[in-house]
Image (cartoon, rainbow, N blue to C red):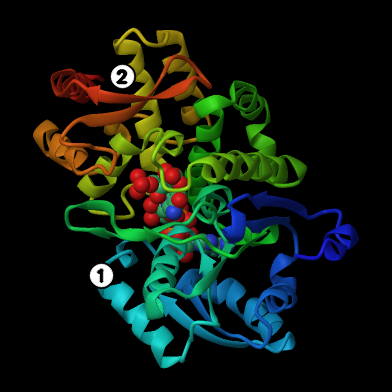
Amino acid sequence: MSHVAEELRPDITRLNVGLGERAYDILIGPGLFHEAGERIARLRPGARVGIVTDRHVAERHLATVEAALRAAGLTPTPVIVEPGEKSKCFRVFEEVVDALLAARIERRDLVLALGGGVVGDLAGFAAAALRRGVDFVQAPTSLLAQVDSSVGGKTGINSRHGKNLVGAFHQPILVLADSDALDTLPLREFRAGYAEVAKYGLIDNAPFFGWLERKWQEVFEGGPARIEAIATSCASKAAVVSRDEKETGDRALLNLGHTFGHALEAGAGFSQRLLHGEAVAVGMAQAFRFSARQGLCTQADAVRVATHLKTVGLPTRIQDIPGDLPDTDGLMDLIAQDKKVSRGALTFILARGIGRSFIARDVDPAELRAFLEAERAAI
Ligand SMILES: NC(=O)c1ccc[n+]([C@@H]2O[C@H](COP(=O)([O-])OP(=O)(O)OC[C@H]3O[C@@H](n4cnc5c(N)ncnc54)[C@H](O)[C@@H]3O)[C@@H](O)[C@H]2O)c1
Ligand SMILES: O=C(O)C(=O)C[C@@H](O)[C@H](O)[C@H](O)COP(=O)(O)O
Ligand SMILES: [Zn+2]
């Protein structure tokens, strides 16, 4: 990537995910979709580009991106899926792969994921599988995708057995996070993405969590605080991914709130009843309450976490989720399918305090069950 364009655009933040020959840039700032063609053509001049997107995003942003690609001599073919988590499934995966093959996307061509985390995970997995692997670019359009899912190369789909159980590690070659795209994102979706922003503070950056407590309204309103929150989140994620690409060690910290959260998402049928970020918010509040119950962190820290999440309008308890959920046995079964489970031993991300998360292996199932029962009984 040339530095010249960034020097001409001081409003663009450029980060790098240091992965040797698979290193890539993350660009964050306004107007990037208008420059998508020029920036992608520098990496793959003359390429065919299969643009995987969803209907909501297509209605708002596809024309801009397509025009930019054509102007730079690239040949785009859109592949449009239905919005929502249910599209992360085998049926839609097959449809996307078939559409990309029909568009003759070859090994030196590209897949462009234009959308939220659902499109990013689905398109990334399609790119990983297509002709045994073609390159892909992430053009994230939701807050969640700009701060988390577009970075790090986890791609995949859900199975009837649980969340993200089929997939591949496949890194993008570029991430273009156009902050203007967030202007069309519904508030509920923005809030859900905010849960993953707060996650970075809770994992290992207490000052960032404190900053969010003071500045969250500015982050929601847009402007410099929003860009700063996105850049801080991406920098945290890039650092973890660079040192542990395939989650053999501390990348698992990025799973804070996800062991509980994924079970709840699956329990809610991957439906609009509970968005991924909302599930993570409940899961993080639970991880801190579970930690406090085990004497690992103070009750005050657990309350502080839940209070901030509640203040921004996120759910923090099972009771905040509308509709029926599996009972404790059902949740335990779903948790048993978590990818961090090893030879049956449960792994959770727990905390000794805000910004002091750690990987807890061999969590006692009896203690977990008692905690889930207590959570269910809480008013
Ligand atoms: N791979 C990873 O590392 C990783 C990390 C975090 C989450 N995820 C996955 O990401 C998914 C959640 O992503 P998400 O929250 O972006 O959900 P999503 O992709 O479903 O997008 C949320 C909703 O907002 C709409 N939308 C997106 N951008 C828009 C825009 N700019 N304007 C208007 N509407 C827009 C979408 O059409 C959809 O209806 C989950 O499947 C989760 O498992 C993956
Ligand atoms: O990138 C990671 O690593 C993460 O854990 C980020 C999470 O926010 C994300 O939801 C991820 O898809 C969960 O990974 P999984 O391995 O538990 O499916
Ligand atoms: Zn997540």
Which SS class for mark 2?
helix
Circle 1 is placed at which residue position?
A: 90
Q: In this orientation, which residue lies closer to the viewer: 173 or 331?
A: 173
Residue 325 in sight:
no
Gap between marks 2 and 1, in whole Å? 34 Å
Question: Quadrant of the image for the C terminus?
Answer: top left
Kindly identify which numbered label has been placed on residue 290.
2
Q: Callout 2 environment at 10 Å: few (<14), some (14 to 19), or many (20+)?
A: many
Query: Residue, x 33% and y 54% (percent of image)?
Result: 272
Kindly identify which numbered label has been placed on residue 313.
none
Going by the picture, which residue comes out furthest to the right? 8
> Could you tell me residue 355's position as x and y percent?
53, 22
Specify the quadrant of the image occupied by residue 43. bottom right
Query: Residue, x 27% and y 44% (percent of image)?
Result: 339
- For ligand 1, tell me if the residue under mark 1 lies within 8 Å: no
Question: Of the residues shown, which amino acid type is indicated by label 2?
Answer: Phe
> Could you tell me residue 348's position as x and y percent?
31, 29
> Could you tell me residue 277's position as x and y percent?
43, 44
Q: Callout 1 environment at 10 Å: few (<14), some (14 to 19), or many (20+)?
A: some
18 w.r.t. 229: above or below: below
> Could you tell me residue 104's position as x and y percent?
46, 91
Question: Of the residues shown, which amino acid type is indicated by label 1?
Answer: Phe
Specify the quadrant of the image occupied by residue 345. top left
Q: In this orientation, which residue lies closer to the viewer: 190 or 231?
A: 231
Query: Residue, x 73% and y 76% (percent of image)?
Result: 42
Q: Earlier in the sequence, mark 2 or mark 1?
A: 1
